[in-house]
């Protein structure tokens, strides 16, 4: 397929090109240049009036929470989402699996309609939970990165005594069914358990420094910082880091990245992540929408909140990179960027949509004015999967 004369945000810097031709072949961006001649039999689409952006990469979700939207609204993070005693675990445990899969599928369709072409989900429930998410995604052409969990948590005594985990075999079995592990946090695991995670060959991620309470709990139980202990798992990325210190952010700069969830952090922890500080410390920062229980999985809303919440500390292109290019880097995937050789996942936006016209600054327009209603089409692997071209 050939998009002709289209405005586009190209490459890792999201460089604005007012008119360019984009050819896709075999699910990839094959050629990007001005005035390409159509191949014989190739479908050519007039791109005038459209803006092509990379598809969004939502690097942290819990879409199992789709069944519990706004349950216990107004309570704290532990009351709502603690993996052992939070209301979320009770709701998920008491829900019929078929009903849960249906609600997760609805969230997948919502993400796709909003321009998210790849998402990474922390999926509770062991192998059964992973299988349920795969069932939910069946037939929905969104790229799902499933980070499973054994749901084996250790108590304070086991952590203090540094007892090894009892679920070693369970972890190996789990990893045969998913793309990696999404660890709840250092405060539910001993050093020995975290070290076991570090030896797994697939993608590793862990929540860290989300709240003052979680930071203080780590110090109280072990005498060491939560981020320091989380890094024992050798994660590819850390999630939240809202309470991380500058030295902790600098330590995190050596891994693939940090995933910030500004809307969730404000609701559950009462503080914006220091996105500018993360970037200044050398971290690759990506964005996630976190629990569907708390937020809609809408990356347009996440970008706007992040940009305005940074109080002028970030430029619009920086935030858009967090939602696209950086997400691909953090997940180690060839997505989130319009360049030759990358997966052809993209969004086509109506430049003259009432919310965008007149578009003086395309990066700012996408970050704080665009929304699902301004999308003409969404493509995954070069195929239009939502809307029309």
Image (cartoon, rainbow, N blue to C red):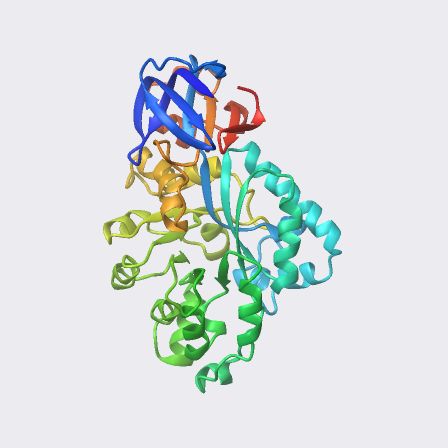
Instruction: Please name whichever residue, 22 or 258, is drawn nearer the observer in this view of the structure.
Output: 22
What is the x, y in percent for residue 103? Answer: 68, 46
State which quadrant residue 47 falls in.
Answer: top left
What is the x, y in percent for residue 106? Answer: 65, 41
Q: Residue furthest bottom?
A: 161
Which residue is at a point 37% across and 42% down the rendered structure image?
322
Instruction: Please name whichever residue, 194 or 258, is drawn nearer the observer in this view of the structure.
Output: 194
What is the x, y in percent for residue 72? Answer: 63, 56
Which residue is at a point 50% across and 15% down the rendered structure image?
41
Instruction: Report if residue 343 is visible in the image.
Output: yes
Which residue is at a point 55% across and 57% down the rendered structure image?
178
What is the x, y in percent for residue 335? Answer: 41, 40
Q: Residue furthest front?
A: 40
Instruction: Report if residue 350 is visible in the image.
Output: no
Q: Decide: is 187 above or below 326.
A: below
Which residue is at a point 36% across and 40% down the rendered structure image?
325
Q: Is residue 294 left or right of residue 26?
A: right
How many tags in the picture?
A: 0
Q: Decide: is 300 above or below 4.
A: below
């Amino acid at each position: 397929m050939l998009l002709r004369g289209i405005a586009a945000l190209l490459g890792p810097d999201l460089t604005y090109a007012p008119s360019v031709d984009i050819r896709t072949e075999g699910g990839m961006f094959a050629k990007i240049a001005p005035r390409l001649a159509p191949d014989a039999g190739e479908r050519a689409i007039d791109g005038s009036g459209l803006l092509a952006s990379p598809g969004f990469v939502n690097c942290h979700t819990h879409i199992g929470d789709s069944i519990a939207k706004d349950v216990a609204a107004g309570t704290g993070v532990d009351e709502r989402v603690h993996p052992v005693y939070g209301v979320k675990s009770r709701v998920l445990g008491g829900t019929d699996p078929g009903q849960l899969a249906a609600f997760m599928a609805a969230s997948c369709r919502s993400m796709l309609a909003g321009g998210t072409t790849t998402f990474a989900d922390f999926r509770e429930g062991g192998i059964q939970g992973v299988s349920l998410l795969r069932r939910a995604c069946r037939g929905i052409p969104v790229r799902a990165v499933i980070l499973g969990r054994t749901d084996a948590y250790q108590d304070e005594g086991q952590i203090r005594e540094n007892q090894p985990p009892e679920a070693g075999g369970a972890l190996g079995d789990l990893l045969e069914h998913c793309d990696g592990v999404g660890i709840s946090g250092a405060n539910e695991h001993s050093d020995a358990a975290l070290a076991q995670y570090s030896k797994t060959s697939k993608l590793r991620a862990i929540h860290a420094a989300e709240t003052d309470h979680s930071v203080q709990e780590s110090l109280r139980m072990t005498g060491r910082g939560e981020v320091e202990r989380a890094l024992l798992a050798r994660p590819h990325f850390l999630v939240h880091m809202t309470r991380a210190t500058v030295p902790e952010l600098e330590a995190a700069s050596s891994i693939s990245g940090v995933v910030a969830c500004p809307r969730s952090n404000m609701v559950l922890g009462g503080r914006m992540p220091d996105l500018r500080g993360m970037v200044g410390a050398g971290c690759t920062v990506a964005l996630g929408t976190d629990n569907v229980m708390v937020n809609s999985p809408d990356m347009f809303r996440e970008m706007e909140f992040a940009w305005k919440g940074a109080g002028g500390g970030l430029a619009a292109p920086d935030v858009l990179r967090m939602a696209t290019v950086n997400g691909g880097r953090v997940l180690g995937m060839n997505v989130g960027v319009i360049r030759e050789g990358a997966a052809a996942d993209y969004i086509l936006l109506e430049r003259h949509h009432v919310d965008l016209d007149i578009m003086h600054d395309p990066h700012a327009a996408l970050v704080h004015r665009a929304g699902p209603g301004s999308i003409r089409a969404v493509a995954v692997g070069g195929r239009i999967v939502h809307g029309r071209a």
